[in-house]
Image (spheres, rainbow, N blue to C red):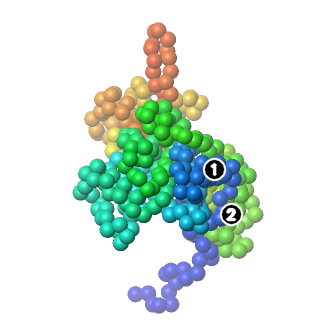
Amino acid sequence: MPNASDDLFTREDPIFANKELLEINHLPGEGRIVGRDDEISNLATAVNPAIFGQSPSNVLIYGKTGTGKSLCAKYVSQRLVETASEEAVKATFAYVDCAQDTTETQAVQTIADSVNRSEVTGIKVPDKGLSTSTYYKRLWRILDAQYDVVLIILDEIDKLSDDDILMQLSRAGEAGKIDQCKLGVIGISNKIQYKDRMDERVKSSLCEREFVFPPYDANQLRDIMDARSDAFRDGVLDPSTIPRAAALAAREHGDARKAIDILRYAGEIAQSTAASTVREEFVTQARQRAETDRFRELIRGSTPHSRYVLQALAMLSLSNERQDGFRTSRVYEVYENICTGQGSDSLSLRRVRDLLKEHAFLDIIEQSKHSGGSAEGSYTKHQLLEDPQVVRDVLSEEVGT
């Protein structure tokens, strides 16, 4: 049995001073949001009336993942609440992750629960067990009882199963559901086409202001990582590590989340190899690990056939590198071969089409429509957005477990 002097655990981290700064969910303090001054200013202008107890504009924000949309929305909302209180206006904001709360009932319960102070209102908001209409009635009473203005952030709004909650929230005042409180909605979507499938009535209410967040460039990514470099101990980061990580991330995606992930993983590699510094060479290894972990998380809980379809697309991508996507029929052929190899009956072509649509919804693949003329008619091509090598490696692990 090991005695008390055995160094099983590291008592002092030689690499990280404050690792929390490199966590995805960490909301940076003032001065740490880099490269988004214009976006923050535009968003603040849209919701500015709220600090006087007036109705803020409803806003829709678009942009790829990791472009600072959620970060800026939370930051502006937080600052609005603080500024409004200086004007004796009672304000708050609620945040809903629509990828988790996909139904109208789940989303309205989350909003009501997060803004409710039951000791003030005397209202309870149970996790489940109430009808959707009852949750709404309690939400309206909570808002009128406590606040002058409330902002509601609906993140990944495109993951909602329908537009019903958008209709209710964007028209609550107009419909007389709330009397004392003014309500503003900030919708966030990774899909710029999202607006095209919205109900026209919702579109007219919700899209008062629209902003697009572009991907970060290498200089902005470098500044973002520099701003979080105090996550590491002094002198631990090699001078070339952050510039290398920024250049790599900018070239591939301009995604700040992935860039910060890469930096954190590079630090963990230094830790696990007992290196005294976080070297540039660790960045390439960290990028591979970050991509692998992110994809593993994306497909967690997916069905075997869902994975076989992705495996087919990865195999096609690796053997035909220059091709810009593959027809459904070609993917299906390779999928059938994989099923045979796994000793499994293949699903119908129609069901495989549905699985491909689900992967497109998760941004694992991209689908594009093409016309083959009068002879062939129209057809769909599918292209992996993930690194096909990462997809194949992760799916091979999954089959082996």
Whether residue 39 is visible to the viewer of this picture, yes or no, is: no
Q: Secondary structure at mark 1?
A: helix
- The residue that label 1 is drawn on is 45
Q: Residue furthest right?
A: 239
Q: Position of residue 268 (x, y in %)?
A: 58, 66
Residue drawn at the location 48% of the way across and 32% of the way down: 196
Eye-nearest disc, 1 or 2: 1
State the residue in front, 22 or 114.
Answer: 114
Q: Position of residue 377 (x, y in %)?
A: 45, 14
Residue drawn at the location 61% of the way across and 42% of the way down: 212
Mark closest to the chain's N terminus, 1 or 2: 2
Q: Secondary structure at mark 2?
A: loop
Q: Amino acid at mark 1?
A: Thr
Q: Position of residue 213 (x, y in %)?
A: 62, 45
| Left or right position of 201 against 234 | left
**Mark 2 crowdedness (10 Å alpha carbons): few <14, some 14-19, many ≥20:** few
Q: Position of residue 348 (x, y in %)?
A: 30, 29
Residue drawn at the location 31% of the way across and 62% of the way down: 125
- The residue that label 2 is drawn on is 31
Q: Are marks 1 and 2 in contact (CB under 8 Å)?
A: no
Looking at the rendered image, the quarter that the C terminus falls into is bottom left
Q: Amino acid at mark 2?
A: Gly
Disc 1 from disc 2: Cα separation: 19 Å
| Left or right position of 30 against 10 | right
